[in-house]
Amino acid sequence: MNHSRETSHTKSDLTLAVRGGEMRPFSQHALALPLMQTAAYTFEDTADLRKFMDARMWGLADGRTEYGRYGNPTVAQVERKLAELDAGDEAVLFSSGMAAMTTSLLALLRSGDHLIVTQDSYRRTRQFCESFLARLNIACTVVPPSDLGALEDALRPETKLILSELPTNPYLRVLDLHALSRLAKRRQVKTLIDATFASPINVRPLSFGVDLVLHSATKYLGGHNDLLAGVVTGSRDLVPMIRQALWVMGAVVDPHAGLLLNRGVKTLALRLRQQNQTGLAVARFLEGHPRVRQVWYPGLDSHPDHAVAAEQMDGFGGVVSFEIDGDLQATSQFVDAVELAIIAPSLGGVETLIEQPALMSYYELSTEERQDVGIADSLVRLSLGIEDERDIIHDLQHALSTVA
Ligand SMILES: *Cc1c(COP(=O)(O)O)cnc(C)c1O
């Protein structure tokens, strides 16, 4: 066994990404993680079955299960690695980030409860809170991002959970996690942070006293745009309850996606180092360009949350949002003139992606309606990959020179 907790020396995230959580030797002494592609597990005879059922009743089955919805050795291995990376006791994987979010919220909340969500949370997360949870008599208040005062004002006696993201999309706002968890603990409210945009390499919310951290593993953790998965990490008090909800609701990750995720995570820290570096270089380049109106990147002094981001993050990430000095059409021209970055939603993979939110998530709205929700027609979101930053900047420079 190679558990890093057995020694007092804290291993680097580069090492944890490769070796974290591994329970060697793997089956048949394989070097790479074996894929256990099975839906169910067998018993030698009824005595073996009885022994298993007894052990499970006492919580001593030691990872053995009878059915794929209750566990898989390949997936369990990835969960241990992700738990170590996020400095949690335990992690549970799901079939997508939204499966992780919806299952966790249903596990944590019941009729009559109230939760607080920050405004620029993932659109589907807010939709789940505002419409689906409302049907179950679970009330939701939406508050502005990075505003602890508004958050405190929204607290009610029946508030059970504060849900936020770090950094947020598309303006990359960064909440003060120490202040958040102090407030929440004082008022006996649980906290859940969706840290998809940061990944465990840039911030570990659990170490600031946050109760649960969630990632869409589809993004940085997987890192290759070839799988969907989600993960929730936290303490032994909370994660088993969420895992039991997963056993009922059934949004389990496929073992093959788990295998791909394990392989992706091995290079997570390496990829993020490059993406953090490119993010800062691209943000600085854009900020100095006359055709760019404004840049949002938490690593820039000009970002409203730069100070708190610099204090609690180890890197500022690979997403840069900016406004072109032009209208919807001119911005589209710029996006089309970019050659290296590919037009696609999502983020966090090895390829640099570009999107104009007005034509993607906010397409149905008019220019005025978009302005009301704070999305300008000229807004562009870049999700940097691991190509050479000089090539990316050269490409952007060329595309900006074409803006009318
Ligand atoms: C993508 C994303 C999700 C949803 O994850 P899926 O894997 O697409 O279900 C949730 N939160 C954030 C911040 C995301 O970027």
Image (cartoon, grey):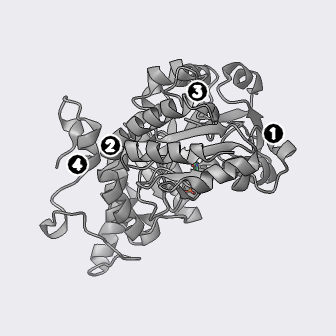
Badge 1: residue crowd in 10 Å (few <14, some 14–19, many ≥20): few
Q: Mark 4 sits on what residue?
A: 19
Q: Are marks 4 and 1 in contact (CB under 8 Å)?
A: no
Q: Mark 1 sits on what residue?
A: 371
SS for callout 3: loop
SS for callout 1: helix
Label annotation for residue 88: none
Q: Nearer the viewer, mark 4 or mark 2?
A: 2
Image location (x, y in percent) of residue 269: 32, 43
Image location (x, y in percent) of residue 259: 34, 64
As drawn, 89 above or below 47: above
Q: Nearer the viewer, mark 2 or mark 1?
A: 1
Q: Are marks 3 and 4 in contact (CB under 8 Å)?
A: no
Q: Mark 2 sits on what residue?
A: 269
Image location (x, y in percent) of residue 174: 57, 29
- The quarter of the picture where residue 43 lies is bottom left
Q: Mark 3 sits on what residue?
A: 175
SS for callout 4: helix
